[in-house]
Image (cartoon, grey):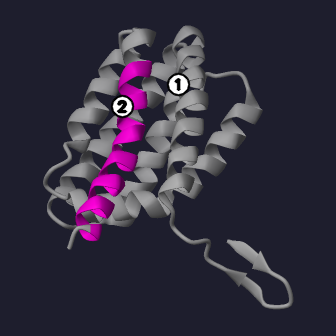
Amino acid sequence: MVSQGQRGFRVAPVSLEDLADITETRVMLECSALRQSIALGDDAWEAELTAAFHRLTRAEEKLAEGNNREQWEERNRIFHEVLIAACPSRWTKHFLSILYHQAERYRHLSLRRSEGTRRLHDEHAALFEAAMARDADTATRLLGEHIRLTLQSVRLDNASTASH
C-alpha cells in the first residue's frame, strides 16, 4: 500500500525494479537464515520441516488440479518459515516475513503465468532434501534459485507482453 496525502491508500504499482529489489534482499536474508537454521536445527526442527513439506506436497497436488491456490500460498509460506525457524535472529525472520508478503502479488502473477511450466514440487523437494541432509551450500543455492524463479517468470512474461 502507498499513502496518498488526503486521499487514503492505493495499491503500489507493480514494477520489475521493485520485484528485483525484493527478490535480491530476500535471497540475501533468507539464504543466511537457512544456513543458520541448518547449523542449529534440532530433531524438532527436522520434524516440523518434514510435516510442513508433507502439507505443502498435498497442497501442490491440489494446485496441479487447478484447486486451492490460497491453501498452497499458506502452506508455501509455512514451509519457508519452518526452513528458517532455527535461525536465532527474530529480526531476520521479521524482515523476511515483510519481504515474503511484499512478493505475494508477484508470486500470484508468476503462478498464473507459469502454470504447467514451473515444477514447484521438484524445487521444494530438492530444497527439503538438501536441508534435511544438512547440506547448507546446496540448500542455499537451491533456495536462491527458487526465489529468483518468480522474478524470472515475471520478467519473461513482461517481455512477451511488451512484444505483442
* Quarter of the rendering containing residue 130: top left
Q: Position of residue 78 (x, y in %)?
A: 49, 44
Viewer-closest of 92 and 58: 92
User: What residue type is disc 1 on?
Assistant: Cys
Give the SS element for disc 1.
helix
Is residue 146 magenta-colored? yes
Question: Disc number at residue 31?
Answer: 1
Q: Who comes first in sequence, dot 1 or dot 2?
A: 1
Q: Position of residue 71 (x, y in %)?
A: 38, 60
User: What residue type is disc 2 on?
Assistant: Glu
Viewer-closest of 16 and 32: 16
Looking at the rendered image, the quarter that the C terminus falls into is bottom left
* Quarter of the rendering containing residue 96: top right
Lateral position of residue 156 relative to residue 51, left or right: left
Q: What's the CA distance linking mark 1 and mark 2?
A: 11 Å
Which of labels 1 and 2 is toward the front?
2
Q: Is residue 47 above or below residue 155?
A: above
Viewer-closest of 73 and 119: 119
Where does label 2 land, which residue? 145
Which span of residues is magenta-colored?
140-162
Q: Position of residue 24 (x, y in %)?
A: 54, 37
Lateral position of residue 54 relative to residue 144, left or right: left
10 Å crowding of disc 1: few (<14), some (14-19), many (20+): many
Q: Is residue 95 above or below residue 115?
A: above
Lateral position of residue 49 relative to residue 124, left or right: right
Is residue 130 magenta-colored? no
Q: Position of residue 5 (x, y in %)?
A: 85, 84
Please tell me which residue is depicted at 75% across the width and 32% down the height of the picture. 90
Q: In this view, does 154 lie above or below 44?
A: below
Viewer-closest of 16 and 75: 16
